[in-house]
Amino acid sequence: MNNLIDLYPWEYERGFDVGIRRFTANWGRPDAAHYDRSKMEEDRKAQAAAALCEIAVARYLNQYAHLHVWHWSERNKYQHLADVGLDVEVRRIRTATGVPVRKTDHGKKIFAARIVDAEYRRIEVLGYIEAEKVMPTLIHQKKSWCYYPLDQLKTIKTAD
């Protein structure tokens, strides 16, 4: 299976729609304390890119992308829902050499994907890691999250 996904026009349009809706749902919300705004992409671009990566991973896996949007005040209600299917979280990688895995990812597969063109129309699915593989390290190191190296991600091998 090809890990480069060229989005269809309707997928591209839907990703940007979801991205801008997520952006406005978080309008006025302060950044998390650990964010460094100088290293971050503008939120309106980052939200769309994340949604496009979710669409690409869903197509790669032949599963449903939920593309959920909710106001930040409802996070506790919906944060347990997967991005794709029943157990797939998608993390968009921009500059990091690892994919973030969190304690809250318990029971999920974490897929890493990145945008490979300036127009956000081509996405590379980098691979995945089962969160359970990382949990013992998080518990031992008393951390809530860590980066799992991209070069150690699993890939799915299927016939094209």
Image (cartoon, rainbow, N blue to C red):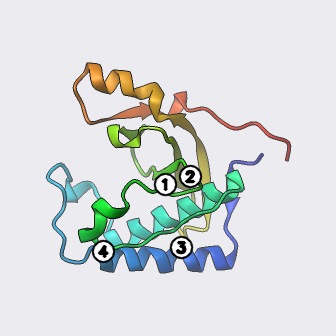
Is 30 above or below relative to 160? below
**Disc ID at residue 15:** 3
Residue reaching furthest to the right: 159
Residue at the image position 36 percent from the left and 57 percent from the top = 79
- The residue identified by callout 1 is 82
Is 62 above or below relative to 127? below
Q: Earlier in the sequence, mark 3 or mark 4?
A: 3
- The residue identified by callout 4 is 71
Residue at the image position 32 percent from the left and 69 percent from the top = 43
Q: Residues within 10 Å of mark 4 (few under 14, many from 20)?
A: some
Is 32 above or below relative to 160? below
Kindly state the secondary structure of the residue where label 3 is placed: helix
Kindly state the secondary structure of the residue where label 1 is placed: loop
**Which percent across, then down, holds residue 153?**
55, 32
Q: In whole angstroms, how far apart are the C-alphas of marks 1 and 3?
A: 17 Å
- The residue identified by callout 2 is 86
The three-letter amino acid code for the residue at tag 1 is Ala
Q: Residues within 10 Å of mark 2 (few under 14, many from 20)?
A: some
- Residue 9 placement, left or right of 119: right
Q: Residues within 10 Å of mark 3 (few under 14, many from 20)?
A: many
Mark 1 and mark 3 in contact? Answer it, CB < 8 Å. no
Mark 2 and mark 1 in contact? Answer it, CB < 8 Å. yes
Mark 3 and mark 4 in contact? Answer it, CB < 8 Å. no
Q: In whole angstroms, how far apart are the C-alphas of marks 4 and 2?
A: 22 Å
